[in-house]
Image (cartoon, rainbow, N blue to C red):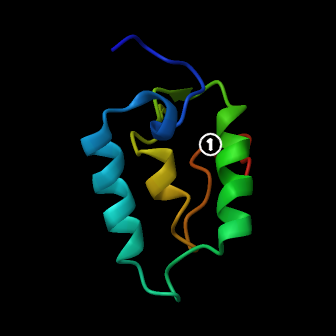
């Protein structure tokens, strides 16, 4: 797989990785989980960030689709938070 800048897992990862992330997100309780509309806005912001490479945030090492799913999480770029 080639390096894909500004791609989400949906666009760049193998099916197994994406399926695993989605299963983990589905297991989150409603109290933990970001509402869908906000989740999609977060992902949109991540796609426009220079630190996103192949679905991974280079600031924290997380898969952005997983990090964005947690209501309490914030963008790890402390100098320029996108969400």
Residue at 47% across / 35% down in the picture?
A: 55
- Above-or-below relation of 58 to 70: above
Quarter of the rendering containing residue 7: top right
Residue 39, position as x, y percentages in the image: 65, 62
Q: Quadrant of the C terminus?
A: bottom right
Is 72 left, or right, of 82 in this rendering? left
**The residue tagged with tag 1: helix, strand or loop?**
loop
Pick the front one: 47 or 26 = 26
Is 75 left, or right, of 22 in this rendering? right
Q: Quadrant of the N terminus?
A: top left
- Residue 59 visible? The answer is no
Seen as rendered, the residue at the extreme top is 2
- Above-or-below relation of 59 to 42: above
Residue at 39% across / 10% down in the picture?
A: 2
Pick the front one: 13 or 32 = 13
- Above-or-below relation of 8 to 76: above
Residue 24, position as x, y percentages in the image: 33, 66
The residue that label 1 is drawn on is 77
Residue 16, position as x, y percentages in the image: 25, 43
Residue neighbourhood size for the residue with mark 1, other residues' Cα within 10 Å, grouped as few (<14), some (14–19), many (≥20): some
Residue at 50% across / 51% down in the picture?
A: 65
Residue 77, position as x, y percentages in the image: 62, 42
Quarter of the rendering containing residue 36: bottom right
- Above-or-below relation of 20 to 38: above
């Amino acid at each position: 797989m080639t390096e894909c800048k500004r791609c989400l897992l949906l666009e760049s990862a193998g099916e197994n990785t994406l399926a695993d992330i989605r299963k983990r997100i589905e297991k989150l309780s409603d109290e933990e989980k970001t509402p869908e509309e906000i989740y999609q806005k977060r992902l949109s912001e991540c796609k426009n960030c220079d630190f996103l490479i192949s679905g991974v945030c280079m600031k924290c090492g997380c898969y952005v689709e997983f990090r964005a799913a947690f209501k309490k999480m914030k963008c790890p770029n402390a100098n320029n938070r996108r969400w």
